[in-house]
Image (spheres, rainbow, N blue to C red):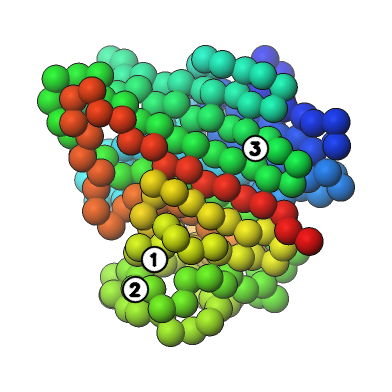
Amino acid sequence: MNPTDLVTLSLPDNSSVIIHLHGAHVLSWKDRNGQERLFMSQAAIFQDGTPIRGGVPVVFPQFSGLGTLPKHGFARIKRWQISHQSPSQVTLTLADDETTRAAWPHAFKLNLTVTLASDALTLELEAHNPGQAPYDFTAALHTYLACAEATTEQVTGLQGLSYKDSVTGEQHQDDAPAIAFGTDIDRAYHAANDREVRLADLHITQTGFPDTVVWNPGPATAAKIPDLHQPEGWRSFVCVESAAVAKPVTLEPSGTWCGKQVIRVVG
Ligand code: TA6
C-alpha cells in the first residue's frame, strides 16, 4: 500500500482512523484504548479496480448485482480526492468521469465526510446531482464491525421491523429480540432509521438511510469468498450497514441527498 494513498486522523486520546483514497474506504478505526473496531480481511486485495474486503466500502450508485452495474456499484473502486481536511475530519470527493458515464450515464458528485470523536466515528455520505435530469440510485455504508467470535455475538435493535431476506428472497417481519450468527444471514431491514442497533458495546445510529443491512456469511458462504481469509475470517465480523436499498433515492437536478452513520463505543 502506498502511504500517500492513506489519510490518517488521530486524537490526543489515542483514537485514530485510516482512510484509503481508493474508494474513500475507511480501513481502520481504533478507539482510545487502541482497540481496532473494524474488521479487515487478512486476504484483502489492495489494487485498482478491486473492492477491499473489510473496513467501510462505500456502495453507490447501485446496491444489488441485478442492474447493469457491478454489485455494489463503482464508488468503492474509484480513486477519490481529498477536498477538506482538519485534525479530526476529512471530506473525500468523487465526481462522474468518462468511465462512470460509460457505465451509468449520470452527473454526480459524492462527498464522504469522516469525523473522528472520542469513542465515536461518524460517516456522512452526500450525493449531489449537478446535471439536467433526475436519476435514481441506491447506496450504503457497508460497515464491517470487528468482533471476537460472531457466533457468540448478537445484533439487537431491529425487532418488529420487516426485512428482506436476501438469501431466500422472502419478506419477513422480525419478532426476535436479537439476530444470531453461524449461518448465512443477509437481511435488509426497512424503516430502520430511528433505531439504535447494538453489537456488543458498539451502538449504531443512522439518519437519511432508511434501511439497515445485517450481514455475516457463515462458514459455507464464506468459503466461496476468495478475499476473506479462510477458514475462520467470517467469525471476526458482522456487517451493520446503513443503506438506501428497498426504494431507490430519486435525485432531482441540483438536488442533494445525505445519509449518515454514527458508531459509538458505549461503556
Ligand atoms: O450487504 C450484504 C451483501 O450485499 C451480501 O449479499 C454479500 O454478498 C456482501 O454484501 C458482500 O458483497 P461483495 O460484493 O463485497 O462481495
Given the image, on which type of amino acid does mark 3 rest? Leu
The mark closer to the camera, 3 or 2, is 2
The answer to which of marks 3 and 2 sits earlier in the sequence is 3
Write the residue at 52% across / 15% down: 83
Q: Taking 194 as reference, is 226 above or below it?
A: above
The local crowd at label 1, few if under 14, some if 14 to 19, many if 20 or more residues have their Cα within 10 Å, is many
User: Callout 2, which amino acid?
Assistant: Ser
Asked if labels 2 and 1 touch by Cβ distance under 8 angstroms, the answer is: yes
Whole-angstrom CA distance, mark 1 to mark 2, is 6 Å
Instruction: Check disc 1 and report the residue beneath it.
Output: 189
Spatial CA span between label 1 and label 3: 25 Å
Q: Where is residue 72 in the image (x, y as percent from the top left)?
A: 38, 44
Check disc 2: other Cα within 10 Å, few if <14, some if 14-19, many if 20+.
Answer: some
Picture residue at 52% right of the left edge, 23% below the top = 92
Q: Name the residue under label 2.
A: 162
> Where residue 264 appears, x then y in whole percent?
67, 52
Identify which residue is drawn at 61% across, 65% down.
198
Nearest to the observer: residue 211 or residue 143: 211
Disc on the earlier residue, 1 or 2: 2
